[in-house]
Image: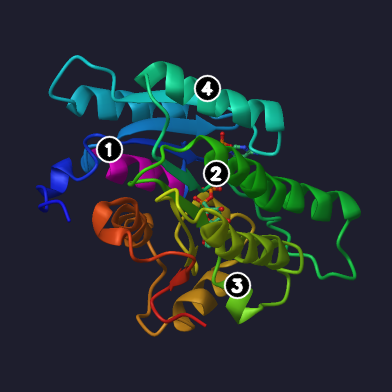
Amino acid sequence: MAAASAPQNQLSDRVAIVTGASRGIGRAVALHLASLGARVVINYASNAALADSIAAQINSAAKSDNVRAITVQADVSNPDQVKSLFDAAESAFGAPAHILVNSAGVLDSKLPSIADMPLEEFDRTFSINARGAFLCCREAANRLKRGGGGRIVCLTTSVVASLKVGYGAYAPSKAAVETMVKILAKELKGTGITANAVAPGPVATEMFFAGKTEEAIKKAVDDCPLGRLGETGDVAPLVGFLATDAGEWVNGQVIRVNGGYV
Ligand SMILES: NC(=O)c1ccc[n+]([C@@H]2O[C@H](COP(=O)([O-])OP(=O)(O)OC[C@H]3O[C@@H](n4cnc5c(N)ncnc54)[C@H](OP(=O)(O)O)[C@@H]3O)[C@@H](O)[C@H]2O)c1
């Protein structure tokens, strides 16, 4: 086993693609992986200005003139755009990526019951959350660097376990990803690539706050033994650990990171 490197250098020879990195958890993950030394591809769907500002932050903190972060617009539910995302990573950094973190995702803030759910909303949720994760994982399975250090981490959700009402499309779309990741880890035997899911509870991002009443927010806080919402900084270090060499032995797992929220 290689000698442990300084924390800021743990990913210094690695390229990471982070989907949904313009905001929220993906943004925090991109910044954290960059702080560990990785070169980062910041994917987004529509918020170019936010993505550019994160890349600028990473590039201005870099000690050399070499570019350490780029932004790439790509809809994760579109196979051609997912291919282009990986192409862009390879052409910017001159080698296959080592790490995929799939954080892009959507939740219908109206939290409709299954009886009231429009088919279009069900399809949109599955298209971005499940099909999007599949397309990114498929591309990663074919194109991430072999021989050690390859990592796939998909963001899922603790609602797969807590089964709250109103999550009748979102939770199954993420349950599909958790199942897929466990199979993927086995299929990647011999590549040195690991595949895991990180499943947060409520995290203070736009996705969580959208459409929620003060009462609903207070209930989420009360339901957590630690008496607060999660922060993006509660999630990013776990993803960072899985991405490092030290995380290699965690493979094919779903890790719920939620302060004990059920
Ligand atoms: N926040 C929570 O409480 C929570 C809890 C458990 C799990 N999660 C999961 O964690 C992940 C991140 O959630 P978040 O709270 O950070 O969400 P968020 O703040 O709403 O950010 C969503 C991100 O996904 C991107 N995105 C949306 N649709 C996309 C598409 N089709 N293609 C590419 N990118 C797309 C957005 O890009 P634009 O900015 O360009 O729109 C944005 O960067 C999601 O998978 C979510 O399901 C969140």
Q: Left or right: where does residue 112 sit relative to residue 211?
A: right
First reached walking from the N terminus: tag 1 or tag 4: 1
The crowding category of the residue bearing disc 1, from other C-alpha atoms within 10 Å (few below 14, some 14 to 19, many at least 20), is many
| SS state under label 4 | helix
Instruction: Point out the tag, 2 or 3, that comes first from the N-terminus.
Output: 2
- For residue 159, the mark is 3
Q: CA distance from mark 1 to mark 4?
A: 20 Å
Quadrant where the image shows the N terminus: bottom left
Tag 4: residue type?
Asp
29 is higher (above) or lower (below) than 157: above
Residue drawn 65% across the image and 27% down it? 81
Q: Dot 3: what SS?
A: helix
Task: Determine which residue is flagged by label 2.
Answer: 141
How many residues crowd mark 4 within 10 Å: few (<14), some (14–19), many (20+)?
A: some
Could you tell which of marks 3 and 4 lies nearer the N-terminus? 4
Disc 1: which residue: 34
> In front here: 118 or 98?
98
Badge 2 density bin: few <14, some 14–19, many ≥20, Cα 10 Å: many
Q: Nearer the viewer, mark 3 or mark 4?
A: 4
Residue depicted at 44% across the width and 32% down the height: 42
As helix, strand or loop, the secondary structure at mark 2 comes to: helix
The amino acid pointed to by label 2 is: Ala
- First in sequence: mark 1 or mark 3? 1
Q: Which one is in front in this view, the residue at disc 4 or the one at disc 2?
A: 2
Q: Earlier in the sequence, mark 1 or mark 2?
A: 1
Say which amino acid is labelled 3.
Answer: Val
What x and y, as percent, mark residue 47? Answer: 54, 29
Determine if the C-beta at disc 2 is less than 8 A from ligand 1.
Answer: no
